[in-house]
Amino acid sequence: MKYIKLIYYYFFCYPFLKSTLGEMGVGSKIFSPMISGGKRIFIGNHVYIRKNTWLAAEPVTGISDCKLIIGDGTYIGNFCHLYASSRIIIGKKVLFADKVYVSDNLHSYDDINTPIMDQPIKQLSIVNIGDGAWLGENVCIIGASVGKNCVIGANAVVTKNIPDYCIAVGAPAKIIKRYHLENKKWQKTDEQGNFI
């Protein structure tokens, strides 16, 4: 049964996805995706994307060169939601748990006399997820970047940049530990990442 599924994937799904996306690397697998703006989505080699993940790169804020880029060896869990209106860049060997949300935009809510769904989409900063980062279940990253080899705890909401080698938790996310390069161990920090 396993071999039948692999044959089906490589003879039917892979060629379809390769023609739908801007780029799809060697050995990458995407299962039951929802894709919007496929030609602006670039997936590296040996990327594994689980079921029912929404990949979108749509210029809803007027930035015609929007892109969603996923680096080599990255693993993305079930039911994740990645929506770029400008640029989302995910590094190499990044690990996403299930139900992670990453966006470089949000709904405007400035006009209290207009329903939020009728207000324009607001462009936020470009999102970069550094190589080797791990995003726990239900993490939301909204217009902020996460450094390399960071750990973002389950249910965290990241709205400000997190530097390299940090552990951040909570809503809004706060840094609680950072790897001390000289001492070669994780140490407690304040919310800005300064060692205590």
Image (spheres, rainbow, N blue to C red):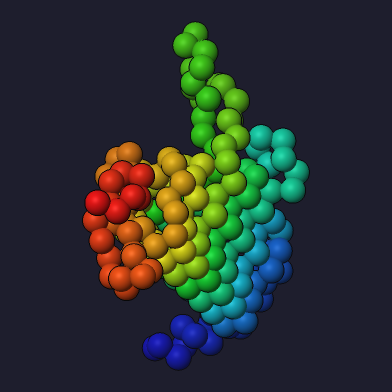
Residue beneath the point at 28% across and 46% down: 190
Residue 187 place in picture, x, y as percent: 25, 61
Residue beneath the point at 38% across and 69% down = 181
In the image: residue 29, left or right of residue 195: right
Along the line of sight, the residue nearer the viewer: 128 or 184: 184
Farthest residue to the front: give it: 182
From the top left corner, tell me how far across and down residue 177 is, in percent. 28, 56
Q: Nearer the viewer, residue 68 or 134?
A: 134
Q: Quadrant of residue 22?
A: bottom right
Place of residue 188 in the rendered image (x, y in percent of width and height, measured from the top left): 24, 56
Residue 154 appears in which quarter of the rendering? Answer: bottom left
Q: Taking 24 as reference, is 8 above or below it? A: below
Residue 24 found in image quarter = bottom right
Considering only vertical position in the picture, is 74 above or below 154? below
Given residues 172 and 167, the one toward you in this image is 167
Residue extending farthest to the right is 64
67 above or below 16? Answer: above
- In percent of width and height, residue 135 lies at 37, 59
Location of the N terminus (image quadrant): bottom left
Q: In the image as oriented, which residue stretches furthest toward the top?
A: 113
Residue pictured at 47% horizontal, 88% vertical: 4
